[in-house]
Amino acid sequence: PPLLVAKAPGLRVVDLNRPKALNALNEEMIDIVYPLIQDWQRKDGDVKLVVLRATAGRAFCAGGDIRFLHDSSASLGGLNPNKAHEFFAKEYKLNRELGNSNIPIVSLIDGIVMGGGVGLSVHGQFRVATENTLFAMPETGIGFFPDVGGSYFLPRLSGGLPMGQYLGLTGARLGGRDAHAVGVATHFVSSDRIEMLEGILAELANQGLNAGSVNQDVLASSIAAINSIDAQKQEPSFIERDGEEITSCFGHEDVNDVLEAVAQLADKNPDSWAGKAHKALKRGSPTSIKVTHELLRRGAALPDLGACLQLEYKVAQRFMAHPDFVKGVSAVLGLDGGKKGAPVAWGPAPTGDELEEFFIGEELEF
């Protein structure tokens, strides 16, 4: 089965179990976990703590099922775009349910976490990174956008909207310490202490069963205490190193000014973060980059996760009908007779009115 659920007193442990597919999130997994998360919310229920993790392998969850979305995309001659819309509706409802959970959800992100995997973990109250964590939101590179609540969490990371723009537009990859520094993770624990942490979580869940709920302050300080065992002198995080430059480049209101600022910095120092960012921005879909920039600006001003997911649902429908998405996924996976990793002939970026159309569509009802 793609998901395994284990029970202990007060505790439920959900293991993502598609290691060959790097635990990519498919519809079957969402259909299993969504009603469980809902059921576990019951005030009089016996679940006081939920742990999300992956069975063996190098990924927590490396994204959504892009092959399925590619095959459902409207721009392929309209196979069945409604299937894709249905997938997004289910996925975004799950994201919101996780974000609004009454009981603490602890995600153990001991590996690759991208796209849909970020949506599974980042909205829960506790996200534990390790030295094996590799975080990215690389959607602009496949002609899509950082969804699953990206418009909510990216602008609210440490460093605010400019930092969110940097991660969302370039798909920059962060290791565990950097993911913790920027706020994608709430805690860092080295992987050889995860078992110890799991024992503590089981104990707290058991106590929570007797007390009526898990004390979240105790939970937070327990995880932090494990980290402090190993918190000897750490390398400075990427924020300390590059944060000021990132803010000055990605703080521009106009996306073209962002691209220009990064290009200038990359010229001066091709080996810097800006050199990598410049390459990523040149590789990505101009439509994805422009829409993402606008989406994150709007998301920063919206009141909550639900409102952001509703906006993203409209944007997702547009991308399903846009040729860039099919081209982008084909290039990454080597489909439609293309070569894996071949450069993509993207369409032009949308103009003012065309950009506005990305934000109009069917409503997502919660």
Image (cartoon, rainbow, N blue to C red):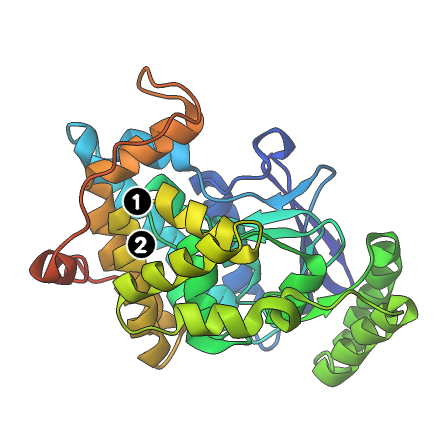
Is the residue 145 above or below the residue 241 in the image? above
Q: Secondary structure at mark 1?
A: loop
- Quadrant for residue 57, please give it: top right
Place of residue 212 in the rendered image (x, y in percent of width and height, measured from the top left):
71, 81
Q: Do residues under tags 1 and 2 come within 8 Å of each other at their CB atoms?
A: yes
Left or right relative to 196: residue 117: left
Q: Which residue is mark 1?
A: 285
* The residue positioned farthest toward the front in the image shown: 268
Place of residue 174 in the rendered image (x, y in percent of width and height, measured from the top left):
61, 55
Is the residue 306 above or below the residue 195 in the image? below
Q: Amino acid at mark 2?
A: Ile
Q: Amino acid at mark 1?
A: Ser
Left or right relative to 296: residue 211: right
Q: Secondary structure at mark 2?
A: helix
Q: Nearer the viewer, residue 119 or 132?
A: 132
Residue 152 visible in the shown view? no
Residue 262 visible in the shown view? yes
Q: Which residue is mark 2?
A: 289
Place of residue 54 in the rendered image (x, y in percent of width and height, measured from the top left):
68, 45
Within 10 angstroms of label 1, few (less than 14), some, or many (20 or more) residues?
many
Q: Nearer the viewer, residue 141 or 147?
A: 141
Residue at left offset 40%, top offset 59%? 264
- Quadrant for residue 127, please give it: bottom right
* The residue positioned farthest toward the top in the image shown: 337
Q: Nearer the viewer, residue 230 or 43?
A: 230
Can you say which quadrant of the picture contains the N terminus? Answer: top right
The Cα atoms of the two marked residues, 1 and 2, are separated by 6 Å
Residue at left offset 34%, top offset 59%? 259
Residue at left offset 18%, top offset 44%? 348
Query: How many badges with numbers are in the image?
Result: 2
